[in-house]
Image (cartoon, rainbow, N blue to C red):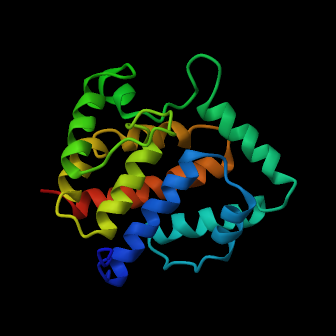
Amino acid sequence: MSAAMPVLAADEAVRADSYRVLARLFAAPPDSALLGALAAAPRAGGDALGSAWNALCDGAASAGAAAAAPRLDAEYNELFCGVGEPRVMRYGSWYLSGSLMDMPLSRLRDDLARLGFARDPAVHEPEDHFAALLEVMAMLVAAGHAGQNEFFQRHLAPWYADLCRRLDGETSEFYRLAARFACGFLDTEAAMLAP
């Protein structure tokens, strides 16, 4: 018999879904299914975060044509997967210590183990990858886990804005929109989860 999933309040479900969408956006280039889901998603109110969401969904709608997929693949690879050092790093250790695979990653691994998360052997990225941290937050929110506040403050709050600023200065319109939504959403989370 499996444990029942908690029934989430609407705002908690939106939080978990927002983390999942952001994790997917930063884990790999957007495919047509993701672009179509964003293009068809309900639009939000007119506050700053709602406007950033609406702009991302509109950007997905305009990029959703099959011809745009190779361009978005190229933009993703150019930004995040360049030969040598990528133009935009997605790893917490790099922002927190100036190098990859450093002490922040070790602390993160300890915290993940305490929370009951184990590394998937099929995943080759370090655990401090932005998308991985967003996915962990989605799971913590969905489970109603009390540790979400501390996890966010320790492993995302100190550096997500730097990553978003770097992306906002890049030429990829789609990833500028993704960065603006990420920053707006995570700023809201930072205020809500503040100790």
In the rendered image, the vertical position of residue 5 relative to residue 91, given as above or below: below
Based on the displayed image, in which of its 4 quarters is residue 112 positioned? top left
Give the residue displayed 71% in from the left and 56% down from the top.
Answer: 31
On the picture, is 186 further left or further right than 25?
left
Q: Residue 136's spot in the image, x, y percent?
A: 36, 53
In front: 71, or 173?
Answer: 71
In front: 104, or 180?
Answer: 104
Give the residue displayed 36% in from the left and 29% down from the top.
Answer: 95
Q: Residue 38's spot in the image, x, y percent?
A: 63, 68
Q: Which quarter shows the N terminus?
A: bottom left
On the picture, is 39 further left or further right than 157?
right
Q: Residue 161's spot in the image, x, y percent?
A: 38, 43
In the rendered image, the vertical position of residue 81 relative to residue 113, given as above or below: above
In the rendered image, the vertical position of residue 129 relative to residue 175, given as above or below: above
Q: Residue 123's spot in the image, x, y percent?
A: 50, 39
In front: 162, or 28?
Answer: 28
